[in-house]
Amino acid sequence: MSELHHMSLLDVLAAFRSRELSPVEYLDHHIARIGAHDGSINAVMDVMEVSAGPAARRAAEVYAGAADGEPLPALLGVPLLVKEQHDVEGCSATRGSRARAGQVAQADNPIVGRLRGAGAIPFARTTTPELSCATFTQTAEWGVTRNPFNPAYTPGGSSGGSGAAIAAGYGPLATASDIAGSTRIPAAFGGLPGFKSPYGRTPGLAPLSTDWYRGDHVLARSVADTAHATNVIVGPHAGDHATIAPAHVLPTAFAGAAGVAGMRIAVSPDLGCYDVDPEVLDGFGAVVRALADAGAEVVEVDPGLSLDDITDASSAHYGHLLALHMTRVCGGDLDLLEPYSKRFVEYTRDFAERISLLEAADIETRVQAQIAQAMAGCDALLTPTSAIAALEADNAYLEAVERPAGPVDFYWQAHMTIPFNIANRCPVLAVPSGVGPTGVPTSVQIVGHPFDDDTVFTIGAAVEELLPFPRSPLT
């Protein structure tokens, strides 16, 4: 118990149940750890100690009085870090934007409500980029959030505070979301697993819950922890008519490396169009070799994707939906937004003016067909999570990004996540593949056939056993 901040969620729950560990002791440990370390990481924008302490004491009382084998809530007593994008009733809801200054949440976000209903204790909220529109995390309101593996670099975004907090050992579970990689990119840069569910698995808030690229998720330390917490948040919700039934229950016990024996796994280092950093390719190769040694048949494929297609479809999509939402939030005055937010709106709005939503859907259909064809006859597809190995923490990336094969106009094009927001019914699990020379972890994505969530978790658990996930050097 000397390293409580490195324990897995499932181990913590077992220790609560056996009374080896008290929810009060565990909560206090993490509040103290945030106080000791967050001055240099800046992943937490507030701590809700006044409400969390009594909730932890109530959970401890339930465990003390529970009979052996008595059913208890799935997350009873677990401290929960909440991405500030996800409302917590009675707390500020600014999204890091001065355009929303003074706004207060009237109710819990649907996934916060489900996690709280399962016994989790919201105790701290994590930073995001403004309105969750960037793959780094910095705002004028909260400052720059840094990567616990190397503070010169970002933990990613938009769930960057959540990813950094889990990597730093501030808690075992955090909320996250993903509309372009916002769960998987912080998972990648933080040495964590990160699951993007198929669209409709998890509930969100209207009107953006109707955006078929999006989903709300969790970040945790292990594949099994991720599955356990995901089981709490999936399923139909009265406030989100896009959610589907029945709620799919993921396994939480896996065969490890033996689980991939006999599987046929398609692998693509670049999806046919990405300029991938050498350290990312090194990590990808290590995972491919480990899976082959474990008995998987590895088949190299070329999906033949076009970066122009991915950019045209996704940027038009964001321009028609997210950019208009952001414009409405700021009342049409884009100067109220962070410079990177303003650039995002202007960049994607330009695509929306040239490409109708119907034309974007035509391109999406082509991308989806190419991915499906590449995966045909295989159980899953393996590819890197981000082509670029790291982003600088202090850089707002307002200009084109230099890459070995030539600059990319917009830094989002340096990540490999968006194709699988376009192929939106495919489950995707990002898992660590190593650590690069900057100290920032590298990552691969395991892509499943539509709604075949179990397979990506089985492969992810095998990778976790074969190549144990890294820990940040934060002591």
Image (cartoon, rainbow, N blue to C red):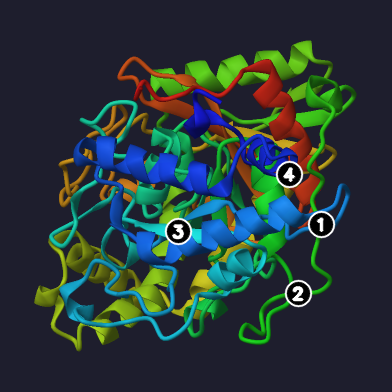
Q: Position of residue 43 (x, y in %)?
A: 30, 47
Look at the image and tell me in which quarter the N terminus lies: top right
The residue shown at (83%, 29%) is 264
Residue identified by numbered label 2: 244
Q: Secondary structure at mark 3?
A: helix
Residue identified by numbered label 4: 17
Question: Is 50 or 267 nearer to us in this picture?
Answer: 50
* Label 4 vs label 2, nearer the camera: 4
Looking at numbered disc 1 in the image, what kind of residue is underneath it? Val
Q: Position of residue 449 (x, y in %)?
A: 76, 50
* Label 2 vs label 1, nearer the camera: 1
Q: Which label's residue is closer to the chain start, 3 or 4?
A: 4
**Is mark 3 in CB contact (under 8 Å) with mark 2?**
no
| Residue 271, quarter of the rendered image | top right
Looking at numbered disc 3 in the image, what kind of residue is underneath it? Gly
Q: Is residue 368 visible?
A: no
| Residue lying farthest to the top in this orientation | 293
Q: Secondary structure at mark 4?
A: helix
Q: Which label's residue is closer to the chain start, 2 or 1?
A: 2
Residue identified by numbered label 1: 249
Query: Distance between the Cα atoms at labels 4 and 2?
Result: 33 Å
Look at the image and tell me in which quarter the C terminus lies: top left
| Residue 158, quarter of the rendered image | bottom left
Query: Distance between the Cα atoms at labels 3 and 1?
Result: 31 Å
Looking at numbered disc 2 in the image, what kind of residue is underneath it? Ile
Image height of 152 relative to 217, above or below? above
